[in-house]
């Protein structure tokens, strides 16, 4: 089989990860980089040994010598650029979130599926072996029927300087400003913890109540050209399709945690917990252990990355998870959080 030719669209910081992962695949060649800044696209190509560079997606599509694209553009460009790629018959691996709103994400999912193209979203924590193991155990009935879920995504870069001084660095300030395209912590990492919990239990929330908070961080809530108006903390109270309840939350004020995901799933015959931060732990309380609250540590075997699953899907012609439709369903939940303060929203499944 001839090599799968991949184009990288958007050559900012995250693009380097995409290039390295795809270049490591034995049957893949990264053939081009595209960026609205043609100079940056050329520099990216030079750094990664990529021959072609374009300053315009239309120009790259007219060239056409690629099979698939990794869409690493900023969030608001995911929809228009992906729709162009789908129209050109190209498979797409898109960064999260799939789009800024559910209607746009829904259109992308419908178009990709109608065209019969491989479509996946880089919800990167699917690559965590502990999550994959928990998913299988829960699906196999190890802890019985799910009754309660707790999940959190913990960051503290608004408290500490582990990632630099956010007050002076645009790469962090834009994440605090709706004017600059931020949907706050909810849009940034909220979709990750929502997927983490949903994938573990095999269900997406069908109803929710949400609270979003933006805290004062500077005089007049502004630094330079950046209004600091995006949410810093988000809490969702959710109900799953089987009636189970859950609490899913994310914050940039969780002191002591640089970047940690925690998940606990409680069922009628046991419970499973994951702690994924600098180190990862997975443990279960099930069987006779439920009577004395004893927990057993579990080992999780390595799993394929999203990049590897995307390549395998192209080779097989069969789409893989997490796909556009799943990401669109998550986006519908995220959208509801912005108007969910008044009470439980109508079913969203």
Image (spheres, grey):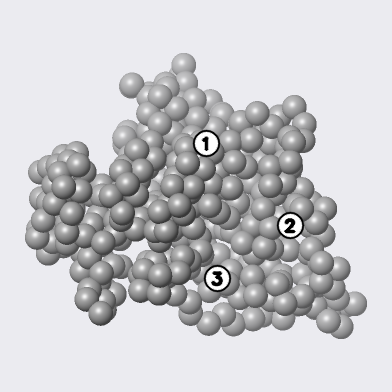
Query: Is residue 287 placed above or below 332 in the rendered structure?
Result: below
Residue 317: image location, x then y, percent: 40, 70
- State the SS at label 3: strand
Image point (20%, 69%), residue name? 29
Q: Position of residue 264 (x, y in %)?
A: 70, 62
> At 20% from the left edge and 48% from the top edge, which residue is drawn?
61
User: What residue is disc 2 on?
Assistant: 149
| Residue sitting at x 48%, y 79% | 302
Q: Nearer the viewer, residue 81 or 167?
A: 81
Q: Mark 1: which secondary structure?
A: helix
- For marks 3 and 2, give the CA distance: 19 Å
* Separation of marks 2 and 1 at Cα, in angstroms: 28 Å
Residue identified by numbered label 3: 280
The numbered mark, 2 or 1, whose residue comes first in the sequence reads 1
Q: Residues within 10 Å of mark 3 (few under 14, many from 20)?
A: some
Q: Return the disc, 3 or 2, that comes first in the chain's sequence.
A: 2
Instruction: Please give the label number shown on residue 217.
Output: none
Judge depth for marks 3 and 1 and give the one in front. Answer: 1
The correct choice, above or below, for 167 with respect to 204 in the image is above
Indicate which disc residue 103 carries. Answer: 1
């Amino acid at each position: 089989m001839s090599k799968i030719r991949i184009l990288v669209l958007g050559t900012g910081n995250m693009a380097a990860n995409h290039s390295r992962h795809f270049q490591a695949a034995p049957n893949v060649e990264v053939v081009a980089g595209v960026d609205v800044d043609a100079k940056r696209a050329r520099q990216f190509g030079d750094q990664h040994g990529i021959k072609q560079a374009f300053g315009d997606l239309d120009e790259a599509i007219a060239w056409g010598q690629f099979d698939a694209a990794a869409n690493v553009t900023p969030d608001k460009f995911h929809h228009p650029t992906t729709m162009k790629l789908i129209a050109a018959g190209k498979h797409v691996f898109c960064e999260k979130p799939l789009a800024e709103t559910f209607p746009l994400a829904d259109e992308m999912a419908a178009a990709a599926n109608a065209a019969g193209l491989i479509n996946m979203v880089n919800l990167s924590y699917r690559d965590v072996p502990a999550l994959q193991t928990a998913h299988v155990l829960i699906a196999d009935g190890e802890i019985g029927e799910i009754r309660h879920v707790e999940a959190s995504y913990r960051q503290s870069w608004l408290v500490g300087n582990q990632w630099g001084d956010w007050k002076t660095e645009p790469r962090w300030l834009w994440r605090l400003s709706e004017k600059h395209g931020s949907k706050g912590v909810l849009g940034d990492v909220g979709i990750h913890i929502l997927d983490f919990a949903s994938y573990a239990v095999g269900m997406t929330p069908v109803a929710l109540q949400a609270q979003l908070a933006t805290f004062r961080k500077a005089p007049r809530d502004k630094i330079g050209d950046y209004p600091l108006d995006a949410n810093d903390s988000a809490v969702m109270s959710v109900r799953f399709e089987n009636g189970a309840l859950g609490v899913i939350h994310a914050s940039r004020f969780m002191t002591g945690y640089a970047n940690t995901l925690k998940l606990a799933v409680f069922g009628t015959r046991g419970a499973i917990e994951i702690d994924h931060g600098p180190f990862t732990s997975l443990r279960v309380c099930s069987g006779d252990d439920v009577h004395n609250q004893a927990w057993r540590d579990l080992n999780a075997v390595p799993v394929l990355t999203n990049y590897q699953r995307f390549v395998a899907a192209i080779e097989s012609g069969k789409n893989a998870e997490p796909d556009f439709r799943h990401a669109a369903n998550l986006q519908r939940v995220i959208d509801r959080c912005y108007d969910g303060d008044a009470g439980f929203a109508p079913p969203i499944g």
